[in-house]
Every structure is written in C-alpha cells, then in structure tokens.
C-alpha cells in the first residue's frame, strides 16, 4: 500500500472560487496528477455535500469546471500542467467555476419546409419558413396560427413590439421579409380566444429578396436589408385609421373580411429612408441604439449608419462575407458570422480603426448565425453549416 | 701578444695629497693668496717635470720593426729613444735563479723595460685568468634600484615651475602651419600622397607571365615540372639508393611501367655522365603541354533553386477558394453545366437527368426544378442587367426562359419586351432554313420558358454576348462550322462563319470588343464581327481543346485540353501559349476566369479543381503572373468523369463546380 502511494505522483493544490455559492474548502489538497475534471468535480461535490447545508437539494449533482493558470482543465492534471510548463512541485491554485449544463431538447416545432427565421417574445415564437408562411407558436410547441401572404420563401421574421401588454390595443405587431422583395407587417390580436393574424402593410421598395430585418429600440421603425444592396427604413406604426376601423366594426365581419381578402386590405408602404452605400448585397442588419444601424453584407464590411442624417458614419472592413451580425447590449461588442469557421467580435465604438477583438474558432463549416445571450455578458450562440450550434462563454 | 696597461692609481692620489698638504700647511703666513698662487705655479712646474719621463711616440705599429735598431721609437722632439740594455743569457739565468720576483717580472714591449708586477696586479691577472670580474667583490647580481618606478606617483620628480612657453602655443609653429596651408591652398605645395607602390615588390616584374597575361586573358601558365629531389641528386644519401634486388626488379620491368630514373651515386659531379633520356623527356613534356591544352573551364556555379522563378507564396495571394462549403444535392444524373446569375444569388445547373435546377447559393436550397425533354448540354444566364433571361440548350433546342428571380420590375419588363417582338414578321425571312423560332406553349410559359429555337442538330453550347441581345449557339454539325448567332430582340438567326477546318469545340464572345472566338480541336480562331474577318489564329498547345475562357480584361485567354494541359495565351504577345500548366492527372474539362479576382480555375476528370492565381498587369511590359495556389478535391469520379464544369461567383472568391457525381459544390 505504501509502495503504491509512493509511486503515484501527487501535487499540492488550493481551490478558490469567485462564486459565492460555491463554498470550496480552504485547506490544501494533495491530488494525484492523473486526476481529470470529473475526479476533481466529484471531490468538490463531496465537500459541498458535507459542508453545504444551505445549498438546495436539487443542485446536489451540480458539476464544476476548473481553471488552472487561465485555461479550462480539459485533460488530466498532468498533461495540463505539462502544457502550461508548471512545475508539479509548486502549490497550484485551481479556480472552481460552475459548469453550465448542456441544454436539453425541450420540444420540436415541425415545419413543412426549411425554417429561415425565428424570433421569440414572452408568449409566442415566430418562425418564418421557405414555404412562404410565417407561423406563430406558443412556447410549449403548439402552432397558434399562421400568416400566409408572401409568394416566395420568407427570409426573416421579427417581433416589432415585444409584448401585447405594452401596446394599448391588445395586439402584437410582427414583420416578415421575403424573397418576393416585400416586407409584410402583421398584427396578432390576442384579445380574442383564438389569436388572429392580420396583414396590415406591405412594404414595397426593394428590388431583390429582402434578407434581414431589424426593429429600433422604441419599436416604431423597421429596417430591412436586401440583395439590391440597399437598406430601407420603414415606419412600423400601424395606421390609426385602420385601428379605428377595427374597433368600430364587428369582430366576426372583420375576421371574415380578413380571411377573404387578406391582400386587399393591406396597405402599401413606401420607405421612410433608403440608405445606399453597400457595394454588394447586404445580408444582415442590427439596430442597437435609436439612431444607429449596423449592416453588413457581401462587400466584406460592417457599415454603421446614422439614421438621423442618413449617412454611413463608419465602416469596419472584414476579411470575409458577413452572414449575420449581432450586437450585445451588455458589452457593446458586435459578433459576426462570416463565410469561414470563425466567430469574430468587433468593437464598433473604436471607429474606423477598430479591428477584430477576437476570433473564436470551433466550427468546422461556415458560421451562419450568431446571437448574444440576452442576460449574460460573455455568452453567445453560434450556428454553423457543420450542423452544430455552439454556446461560447469567453472571458 | 700580451700587453697590460697599468694605471698608477695610488701614486696620483699620493702626489695630490702631498700638494694638498702643502697648500694647507701655510695657514699662518700673512699672504695666503700669494702663497697659494705660488704653490699652484710650483705644482705646474712639477707637472712639467713629468716630461722628463720620455714619452714614446712610436704609435700603433708592430714593434718587431724596431728589432734591428738600437732604439725604440722617438720622443716628442724627434730623438730616438734607446732601448734599455738587455740582459745577456748568463744574467738572465742568474736572475732566474736568484731574483725571487723574477716570475712576476714582465717586459713592457712599448718601452722595453722590465716591470715587476705588484701583488694587486697579480691578483687582477689571476682573476682575469679564472674568468672572474677584474674588480674584487663585484656583485653582478646585486638588486637593482630603479630610479623611475613603474608605479604612478603623485608627486613630480622635480618641483621646478613649468615655463610659460609650455602653456602657450608656439607662434612660430602656427606661422609655419599657416604658411603650409596657404601653399596647399594655392596649389604650390601638393600634400604627399600615399604611393601605391607596395613596400616590397619584384624588382624585375613578373616576367613573361605578366606579358602573356595581358595579351591572353584566359592564359594559364604551363605547370612547372617537379623539382629534383634527393633521389635525383648525383650523390644521393645512401637511403635513396636502390638495393641490388630493387635494381634487378627495375631492370626486369618494362619501360613504360617502371620509374623513369634510377638513383645512382657518383663520387663527384665530374663523373656524372650525360643524361641519356634528356631529349626523350623534353619531347614528352612538349607533347604533354601541346596535347593537353590548358583551358579555363567556364563552369557556371548556379544553385538550382535560383533557376526557379521566385513565385509568391500562395498564402500571400489570398483570397482564393480553399474549402468545400456547401454541397448542392438533388440531381439524379451527372451535372453537365452550371452558371451563376450576374448578381450572384442564384446558380442554375443542368443535369443528365433532363432537369435544370436553380439553387440559392448561400443556403444550398433548390428553388426551381425544370424538366426538359432531353438533357441540357449548356445553359447561360444573360449577362445584361436589364434582362432576366436564361438560355438552355437541350438536344436540338435552345430554350430562352425568363427565370423570374431578379427584380420584379425587370422580370415584367423582360416579359413585355419578349412579347413585343413576337409580332415582328421579319423573323422568318432572316432565319436560315436550319433554325426555327417558336413561341412556347402556355404550359411551358408558366414554368418560365418563353422561346424555343429549334435546330436540326443537337446544340452543344450556348453563350450570350455581353449586351444580352445576341446569343451564339454551337450546333454539332459535321459539314459546317455549326456556329449560329441568334438575335433575341428580332428573333433572327444567322450563320456568319463558313466552314472552318476541324470540328468546332467551343465558342466565346469577347467580353468587351466585337470579337468572336472559335476553338477547334487544336486551334483558336479570333474573328472580328464588325469587320467580318479572321483576326488571329492561336496555336493551342494542346491536342484537343475541351474548354476556353477569356480574361475579363480581354487580352488573355485560357484553354483546357483533353491531354491534361491548361494553356494561358497572352493575345498581344504571341499566338503560342504563354504558359502551359500541367497540374491535372486526367483530361481537363473546364476552365474559367474569375470576373474580379485574379484567379482562374480548371477542373478535370480526376475530380480535382486547380485554382491558380493569374495576375494580369495594366503595364503592357509586364507579363502575367501565374501561380498555382490550391487543388480542391471533393468530387468523386464516376465512370471516369470527374468535374465537368466550374464557374466562379461574380463578386466573391468562391467557386461552384458541377460534377459527374450529380452534385454541385461550393468552395470558399
């Protein structure tokens, strides 16, 4: 027995944690170098069980991750330390962080065709599909209703107002962009027992398929980008006349009229503003602040537009085609999905000279979509043509 | 000769001491000074008494000369000095017997007197005889006290005040310097220059060697024969002499094999006979020099790496397609032809299964499938931005269809223009007998087809003119060229080319000028459409042309051949290929240029696509730079057919390839 313990190498380690919920023991441990993350995790779990009476019972099997000298422990301690060229003689400080459990598949929303856009608000999930239909689903996976009006595949959908309670008339607006070169503004009336979709406006003006939509923070304007290299700003406020009409008329008659002649009732809208400057088709747009729109496309650059004056304030040049950009409200970084395997992070505040802050490489194919977590500063999701969706937390 | 000079050291001092005593003794006398003078005078006089001792002025001559004379030299007055009387033998004997100091009595040769050496002198002589220092007690090795020590001292050796002159620069020197400077300035004086003559040099020069060297730059002096050694000596050391057995062996050996010379010993140089082999050896040496001419070989020392032209690294030539990104699957037969819409959103492909599919490039979604009665051989989007037309050649029919995927307004305007020309009655007149223009049926029109141009033979290729009105079709005809040019707006067809030698393989419009390229099996002919004449013939470096593409600049051309080669032509440079690229292992099926980036690609039956960087410079003097940068794989050969056509994206460094494995692939 003694002989065996002598043979296995041990290192001295101290656990620390910035997380107040992870109460790690202060004492120094002697850990065999062959231990990997799972072994350390079970060790910590053992101590937390022993000491932590204040912890919830449900989190007993909570897993932990370990950071040694700035890197996550992925392999055994021995190889990790060898990579870091840390002497195994010294006392090693191991930071304990909580492990994010992998998301579980909760529900499947069956579509007949490819899904090209999805947007979630507090009650519903909006999806746009290649069968030219926009569908609205409840969060538990039931299709509430569908909106048919496009003649070509829908490319993007977006909720204009986030919640029914915020708008006085008890309805929610959403917009859809399609390859039929139009943007449709719809309203979803929640007041009735059966939600009704009403086609309010058709925004005509683009000459090629509309690729992406963005709504301004005050929910009254809409920006669309298209293959015709232009950005167009539309008003997202429904005409009041129509609202009055809706209220004055009988509900059933309205319903019938809407079903019969959805197209006819919709009024055509023209753009408030057209922004021209991209030299190649535009593929993606975000509207982070009231008077600033960011768009990017196949001319390999992100353009920042001032909506008030309608000029291109600055341009960030990238190396590849942009498929998707997303702006984080928490750290003001812009994440971009390009036509390569990298997710790039940009700081738009740095102006023209700003470079890529960092590039995250983990995908095997083109990254096609990227999205920041709404409430965690350092988390983002990226989807790729290698059929994988990755959640990245970076420090 | 043994001469000893004796200096009367003690006597002089004694004399002086006596006179000193004399000076000091008369202290009490009244007139001291007078007496002192007197004594001094006396002393002078006593000095003169010294003359009484006769000074011999004989000089440094051998004294034997005086042997026969009774005198020995002369005194100052010129009188002879008589030799002292010499003792006869008896007296000598008696002296030897009786005189105890005889043994130390020596004769002074200069005076002839006998001198008895004192005890001190004897000791001196003895010390000298025993090789000691003459002075007694002299310590040769006594420690040497150096007056100037090596250490640095803080005080000066003497404390005399330094003269003022040592602080003041010398005026005289300044004057001299200024005079010299002035002389140099005026050119009177020339500063001495360093002579280039070396310190040591051959006084008689290099001789004939230098002369010959000046006349013949490549002169090499004859190698010198080896110098004779010990063995060639007339009297060699015994170790060089051959033993009798060696001599015997030498005699037995044949003339050519043995050493030419056997060492031989002669007592004196006189006995050395004439060298018998002299003439023969001279002759052989002359033969050597004559038959083996000395020539400086101009061997070029070149590193093989330097001969390879310096090509930039592919890394520096980005962007170019590197990875397979999207695979477009849906066809059931091999994909024969592919073309991308001018804006780059859609790609159309025609397959052997008789269908034309239109795909969204970015997503890989097939948005349209059109079935044709016969498999399409070629399809082409209209390059004009104001038409949304697609020409498809399937069988003997060229379909012109409105794909309806651009701007709505453009789609409708294209349709209206097409229908406006329907009514023109001139169509039938202008059309040659072999082609007929037909309106498509209503069912076909719903799918997008607008016109069908019926040919009597299968159409191999269809290409648009850059303006989008003219359309050239290549018909597989045996007798004729088979090139038919259609005008869509007027629905006319014409055959501008009479028979061309060879079977026409590909046709192409020049991107900017009214030129038309016809590629036969081994030749590319360039026709001017405006002047209607043959402008140029290009000798293809390949045996059978499979495909051709023209640089968007219009001055360069690439063609691929079934014999695995891709040739680049500079149309201004020559009618021969500028560069031949042999990268493929199988027949090259398609070549294409990128419309924006300096790239071109070629695809072949081995399933590989080769991307090359092909930079064309505006400077006419600079030749195009061609660097192969990437080989793309992905397509699997089916029935020994690999990639059938490649096309570049109009504004991105992407490539779409059509393969025999019924897929299209996007490389980015």
Image: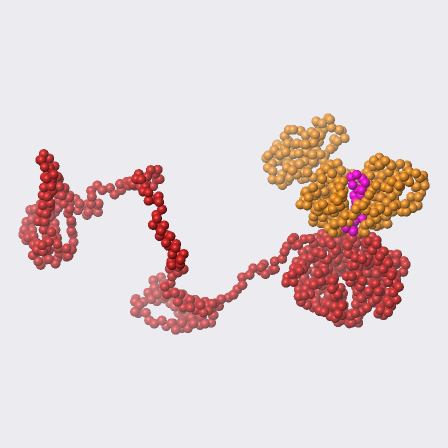
Chain colours: A orange, B red
Identity of the residue drawn at 39% across and 60% down? B197
Q: Is residue A109 left or right of residue A298?
A: right
Q: Is residue B172 visible?
A: yes
Image coordinates of residue A191 in percent, x first then y, are 89, 36
Image coordinates of residue A16 in percent, x first then y, are 66, 32
In reply to whether residue A217 is colored magenta, the answer given is yes
Task: Determine the image quadrant of residue B591.
Answer: bottom right
Question: Taken as a whole, is the magenta stretch helix, strand or loop?
Answer: strand
Image coordinates of residue B272 in percent, x first then y, are 32, 69
Identity of the residue drawn at 66% across and 64% down? B578
Q: Which residues are magenta?
A: A210-229
Q: Is residue B570 left or right of residue A257?
A: left
- Of the 4 image quadrants, the one containing the N terminus of chain A is top right
Task: Determine the image quadrant of residue B388.
Answer: bottom right
Residue B512, compared with residue B319, is above or below; it is: below
- Of the 4 image quadrants, the one containing the C terminus of chain A is top right
Q: Is residue A112 visible?
A: no
């Amino acid at each position: 027995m003694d002989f065996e313990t002598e043979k296995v190498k041990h290192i001295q380690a101290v656990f620390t944690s910035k997380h107040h919920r992870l109460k790690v023991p202060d004492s120094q441990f002697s850990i065999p170098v062959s231990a990997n993350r799972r072994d350390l995790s079970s060790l910590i779990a053992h101590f937390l069980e022993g000491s932590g009476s204040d912890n919830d019972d449900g989190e007993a099997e909570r897993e932990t991750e370990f950071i040694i000298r700035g890197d996550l422990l992925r392999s055994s301690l021995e190889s990790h330390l060898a990579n870091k060229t840390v002497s195994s003689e010294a006392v090693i400080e191991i930071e304990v962080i909580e492990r994010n459990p992998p998301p579980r598949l909760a529900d499947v929303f069956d579509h007949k065709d490819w899904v090209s856009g999805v947007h979630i608000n507090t009650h519903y999930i909006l999806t746009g599909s290649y069968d030219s239909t926009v569908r609205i689903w409840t969060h538990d996976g039931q299709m509430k209703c569908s909106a048919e009006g496009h003649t070509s595949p829908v490319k993007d959908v977006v909720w204009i107002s986030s919640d029914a309670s915020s708008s006085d008339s008890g309805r929610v607006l959403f917009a859809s962009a399609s390859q039929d070169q139009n943007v449709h503004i719809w309203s979803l009336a929640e007041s009735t027992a059966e939600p009704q979709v009403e086609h309010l406006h058709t925004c005509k003006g683009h000459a090629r398929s509309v690729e992406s939509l963005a709504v301004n923070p005050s929910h009254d304007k809409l920006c669309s980008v298209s293959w015709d290299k232009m950005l167009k700003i539309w008003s997202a406020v429904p005409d009041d006349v129509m609202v009055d009409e809706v209220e004055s008329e009988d509900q059933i008659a309205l319903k019938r009229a809407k079903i019969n002649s959805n197209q006819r009732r919709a009024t055509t809208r023209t753009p408030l503003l057209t922004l021209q400057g991209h030299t190649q088709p535009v593929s993606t747009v975000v509207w982070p602040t009231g008077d600033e729109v960011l768009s990017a496309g196949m001319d390999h650059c992100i353009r920042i537009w001032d909506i008030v004056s309608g000029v291109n304030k600055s341009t960030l040049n990238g190396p590849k085609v942009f498929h998707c950009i997303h702006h984080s409200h928490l750290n003001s970084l812009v994440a971009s999905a390009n036509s390569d395997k990298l997710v790039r992070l940009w700081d738009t505040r740095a102006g023209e000279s700003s470079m890529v802050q960092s590039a995250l490489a983990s995908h095997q194919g083109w990254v096609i979509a990227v999205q920041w977590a709404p409430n965690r500063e350092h988390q983002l999701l990226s989807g790729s043509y290698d059929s994988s969706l990755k959640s990245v937390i970076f420090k | 000769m043994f001469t000893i000079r004796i200096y009367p050291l003690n006597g002089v001092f004694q004399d002086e001491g006596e006179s000193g005593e004399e000076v000091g003794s008369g202290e009490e006398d009244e007139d001291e000074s007078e007496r002192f003078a007197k004594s001094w005078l006396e002393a002078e006089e006593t000095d003169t008494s010294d003359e009484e001792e006769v000074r011999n002025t004989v000089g440094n001559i051998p004294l034997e000369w005086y042997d026969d004379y009774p005198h020995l030299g002369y005194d100052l007055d010129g009188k002879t000095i008589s030799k002292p009387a010499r003792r006869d033998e008896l007296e000598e004997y008696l002296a030897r017997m009786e005189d105890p100091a005889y043994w130390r009595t020596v004769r002074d040769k200069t005076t002839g007197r006998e001198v008895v050496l004192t005890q001190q002198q004897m000791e001196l002589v003895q010390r000298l005889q025993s090789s000691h220092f003459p002075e007694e007690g002299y310590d040769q090795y006594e420690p040497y006290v150096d007056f100037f020590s090596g250490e640095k001292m803080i005080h000066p050796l003497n404390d005399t005040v330094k003269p003022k002159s040592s602080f003041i620069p010398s005026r005289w020197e300044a004057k001299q310097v200024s005079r010299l400077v002035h002389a140099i300035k005026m050119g009177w004086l020339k500063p001495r220059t360093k002579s280039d003559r070396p310190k040591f040099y051959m006084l008689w020069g290099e001789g004939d060697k230098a002369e010959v060297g000046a006349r013949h730059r490549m002169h090499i002096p004859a190698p010198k024969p080896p110098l004779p050694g010990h063995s060639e000596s007339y009297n060699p050391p015994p170790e060089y002499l051959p033993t009798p057995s060696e001599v015997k062996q030498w005699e037995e050996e044949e003339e050519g094999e043995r050493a030419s010379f056997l060492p031989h010993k002669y007592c004196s140089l006189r006995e050395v006979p004439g060298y018998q082999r002299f003439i023969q050896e001279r002759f052989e040496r002359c033969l050597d020099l004559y038959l083996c001419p000395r020539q400086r070989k101009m061997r070029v020392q070149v590193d093989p790496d330097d001969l390879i032209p310096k090509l930039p690294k592919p890394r520096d030539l980005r962007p170019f397609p590197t990875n397979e990104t999207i695979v477009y699957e849906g066809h059931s037969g091999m994909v024969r032809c592919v073309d991308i819409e001018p804006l780059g959103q859609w790609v159309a492909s025609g397959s052997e299964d008789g269908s034309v599919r239109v795909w969204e490039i970015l997503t890989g979604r097939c948005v349209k499938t059109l079935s044709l009665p016969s498999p399409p051989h070629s399809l082409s989007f209209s390059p004009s931005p104001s038409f949304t037309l697609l020409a498809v050649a399937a069988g003997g029919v060229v379909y012109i269809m409105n794909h309806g995927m651009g701007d709505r307004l453009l789609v409708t305007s294209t349709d209206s223009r097409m229908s406006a020309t329907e009514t023109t009655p001139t169509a039938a007149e202008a059309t040659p007998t072999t082609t007929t223009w037909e309106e498509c049926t209503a069912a076909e029109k719903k799918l997008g087809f607008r016109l069908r141009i019926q040919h009597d033979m299968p159409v191999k290729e269809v290409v648009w003119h850059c303006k989008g009105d003219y359309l050239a079709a290549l018909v597989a005809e045996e007798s004729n060229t088979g090139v038919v040019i259609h005008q869509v707006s007027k629905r006319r067809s014409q055959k501008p080319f009479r028979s061309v030698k060879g079977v026409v393989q590909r046709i192409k419009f020049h991107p900017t000028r009214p030129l038309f390229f016809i590629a036969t099996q081994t030749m590319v002919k360039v026709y001017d459409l405006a002047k209607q004449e043959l402008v140029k013939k290009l000798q293809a470096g390949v045996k059978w042309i499979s495909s051709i593409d023209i640089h968007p600049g219009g001055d360069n051309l690439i063609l691929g051949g079934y014999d695995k080669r891709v040739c680049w032509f500079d149309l201004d440079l020559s009618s021969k290929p500028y560069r031949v690229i042999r990268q493929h292992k199988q027949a090259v099926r398609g070549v294409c240029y990128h419309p924006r980036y300096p790239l071109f690609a070629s695809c072949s039956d081995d399933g590989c696509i080769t991307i090359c960087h092909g930079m064309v410079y505006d400077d006419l003097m600079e030749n195009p730079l061609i660097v192969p940068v990437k080989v793309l794989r992905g397509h699997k050969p089916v029935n020994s057919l690999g990639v059938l056509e490649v096309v570049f994206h109009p504004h991105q460094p992407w490539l779409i390839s059509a393969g025999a494995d019924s897929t299209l692939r996007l490389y980015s």
